[in-house]
Amino acid sequence: MPEYNLPKAYDFGSTEQRIYSWWEKSGYFKPSNDPNQPGFQPDQKPFVISIPPPNVTGELHLGHAMFVSMEDLMIRYHRMKGIPTLWVPGTDHAGIATQLQIEKALAREGLTREQVGRDEFMRRTWAWKAKFGGIITQQIRRLGASCDWERERFTLDEGLSRAVREAFIRLYEKGLIYRGPRLINWSPGLKTAVSDLEVEYSEEPGTLYYFKYLLANREGEYLPVATTRPETILGDTAVAVHPDDPRYQKYIGQQVIVPILGRHIPVIADEYVDREFGGGALKVTPGHDPNDYAIAQRHGLPVISILDEAARVNENGGPYQGQDRFEARRNLWEDVRLAGLTIKEEPYTLNVPRTQRGGEIVEPMISTQWFVRIGSLAEAALLAVKDGRVRIVPERFTKVYYNWLENIEDWCISRQLWWGHRIPVWYCEDCGQMTVARQDPTQCTHCGSLKIQQDPDVLDTWFSSGLWPFSTLGWPDETPDFEYFYPTTMMETGYDILFFWVARMVMSGLEFTGEVPFDTVYLHGLIRDENGRKMSKTYGNVIDPLSVMDELGTDALRFTLLVGSTPGNDMNLSIKRVEANRNFANKIWNAGRFVINALQQAPAKPEAAPDWTLADSWIWARLQTLVRDVERLFQSFQYGEAGRQIYDFCWGEFADWYVEIAKLQLAEGGDRTFYTARTLVWVLDMSLRLLHPFTPFISEELWGHLKRAAEAYSHNLAPTGGWSDALIIASWPEPRLLEGWEDEKVAQFNLVQDVVRAIRNVRAKKNVKQGHRIPALLVSESYSGILEGQKLALSQLAQLDPLHMTIQTSLPTKPEGYIALVVGPVEVYLPLADMVDTSEEYARLERELSEVQSQIQRLEALLDSAFAEKAPAPVVQKEREKLDAYRETAGKLDAQLAALR
Ligand SMILES: [Zn+2]
């Protein structure tokens, strides 16, 4: 029999890609029950996830790593349970993000998109997509994602574009889409409307400007008004006061004069006014402020737009026409000052809205846009969660979902971009009517004129991603995929896009397919740095998942993300944790090497029925408990806790305890060796199955070795049901019924563990050298029999001298020079008084203590100095942590010295 040897260390670098290609080539990512294949069983319920499509411009970040790891875990678990699984991958065309990339490239050539024209711009964008669009999906593969790549989709591909047009036309025909002027977020740099999602708020220093709104008919009287944007005075159409404000009641209904422009506008009463802010009177600029816009709607005020699409003052701005908004701000304020209308200026912290992509300040503006009338769609989406057709995990986000949908406003779906789904509306030059059509028309449907022009705008990216769960399966056609895999099962995503995306998918799903698009929404949290701060380029604390995978392996990263997360809560990620999980992978590998080596020492088959040892029974019972607990935790979405328990079992129980005892059992020979090897093989096999959804690469690689070694050596070592072709499609461990013996065996073994731990503690405290075996006397009236049976194990694990180890039921007199330990029903006597040279030990501890104390003094001085104020907070924090650690060490050394005195 040739010896089967495993490489000494696990080399993830050479393993991951090889394993991934093999899985993909073998078709393991495809559903086991496929409506397009012979033998299809329509009654088997599948488990389906649509991937949240990353932007086609994307570079892998930790957010991607998180959702890919989590969804892959869910998919692998269900696949191993024998459920047909489908994970549909794809990418989003990401209107603004992609268009900006192309515009930047044009700018490097000194060109603008207007200069090259729409057709050339689109040609360049598609060329860019062809070249770089696959990067993000390659990176997702590196994470181990077991998606069905043959079903990969792109939001701008032909099928999805047809779905988008169908959805638009259906809404239009139902009267749910309209065009009109509304206040929207305008990006003057990008010259497009942007969604709330694309706006980021940052706190910045600014100024609050106080000035006088003179009453038209009361000489010398005025309302004091404060604003952070004086240029908006040009668009004021009222001044509002609180109806209960005694100071200003007499002015309600009167007219005031707009500074510089001299227009007369009314003073109105509205409860929105904050009496504490500024002078207690509010200028109302409905054309450039969402709250003012709402006030104008309530009071029927006119709306004046004062800026053009580049945020320059337009013809409504009198003398400031043509000036940039910030230039107009300075000039107007100077003129107000010269007119004697200013009161004061004070510093003020602004919450400035900036576009996520371009970075410039967003201007609320009135603009003619396309909207979806959202009322009936939102009501249906609310009901779907209220009546339980869609479940949100964790449940607390249900309230957030309700609150958002109950206050939702009509959805602005047009964007002034070129990259996206063009709005399928054509305007007629002759009759002025609109033609809205599924197929591009050649003439006006109203008058037959050939002079028609398509709307230049495109649809909001979220319009197409809202259709994602069903458009990717072939809708609007009733394809076999759509029939079988829709509605999907699970929508897993970050809680930050619950509204932008999840709610829209529920609305669209109900509207277009009559069904909810998924039964469950699982929301994961955001990933912060180890100190709980948001990762950002500004702080320099961004962790790049690709370099982490390069250095520590994909499994270590995945395990860290999965085990560190709980539904809906943010997690802090530190590289130290990833390193610890890389060590875990090595620990598993070493355990695997041991098992593969062990199975070759065993006879090919046993002579008799098994006679299990206490350790055999214990590890088996613990494994069964683990399988039950993991199942329960998976059912309640507590994947992190399940991972922690698997980790503790593999490392803390299997590798640290059972493997150590197995070494003794293997040496006994015969059936003991055979059954020990079989226990090792079976427990490792089950552990790797449980680990597989978390750490797919090392588990598959090691399991493959285990299988091949066991098959080469003896068929009697195969697990029940035999070995499958690959771990990825092996069966998930099913919980077994308890047989009744488990609790007793576990309790007995726990006692052995407690005794060993107690002896190890004393040895460490007394500084007994590793490997130095010491005599021991164990006394227990009721457990001496069990201890006697575990004598070898005890001596091995606690490093006792088996020739001088006595187990008794009672002890008439306490032996001289022995230390006594009480471990539950067992007393342990160790002759440690004679074993330790205390004077030498005392000197060693004192040397250590003095070194630690000098470090403490150094750090205390450092943290007392200017360093603590000037150095970056994380650096200071690190030094503080060092100081704390030294202080703790000093405390321990003190205690040890005291014990020796
Ligand atoms: Zn016409």
Image (cartoon, helix red, strand yellow):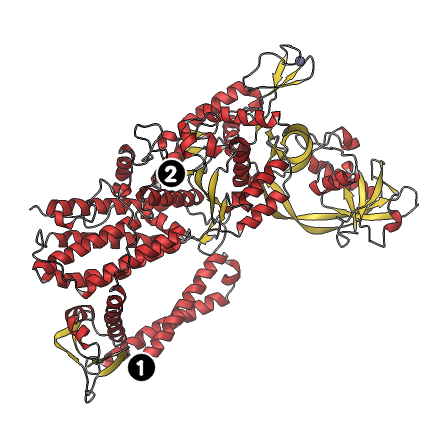
**Residue name at image x 66 percent, y 27 percent:** 179
Give how far across and how far down residue 645 sits, in percent: 34, 57
Horizontally, residue 358 falls left or right of residue 158, namely right
Apparent side of residue 719 relative to residue 850 in the rendered image (left or right):
left
Q: Point out residue 540 in the picture as x, y percentages from the top left corner.
A: 47, 48
Residue 373 sits in quarter: top right
Mark 1 lies on a secondary structure that is helix
Q: Residue 142's mark?
A: none
Q: Residue at x 35, y 74 (%)?
A: 892
User: Which residue occupies the foreground of this view, 491 or 858?
Assistant: 491
Q: Is residue 467 left or right of residue 175?
A: left
* Amino acid type, label 2: Pro
User: Label 1, on which residue?
Assistant: 899
Q: Any mark on residue 46, and which?
A: 2
Q: Residue at x 45, y 64 (%)?
A: 880
Taking 732 as reference, is 512 left or right? right
As measured in the structure, the alpha-carbon distance from the residue carrying label 1 to the one carrying label 2 is 65 Å
Q: Amino acid at mark 1?
A: Ala
Q: Nearer the viewer, mark 1 or mark 2?
A: 2
Q: Considering the image in quadrants, where does the C terminus appear?
A: bottom left
Along the viewing direction, whichever of 865 and 64 lies nearer the viewer = 64
Pick whichever, 898 or 152, lies toward us: 152
Number of other residues with Cα within 10 Å of mark 2, as a class: few under 14, some 14 to 19, many 20 or more: many
User: Where does the image place residue 525, in percent across and percent down from the top left?
Assistant: 47, 49
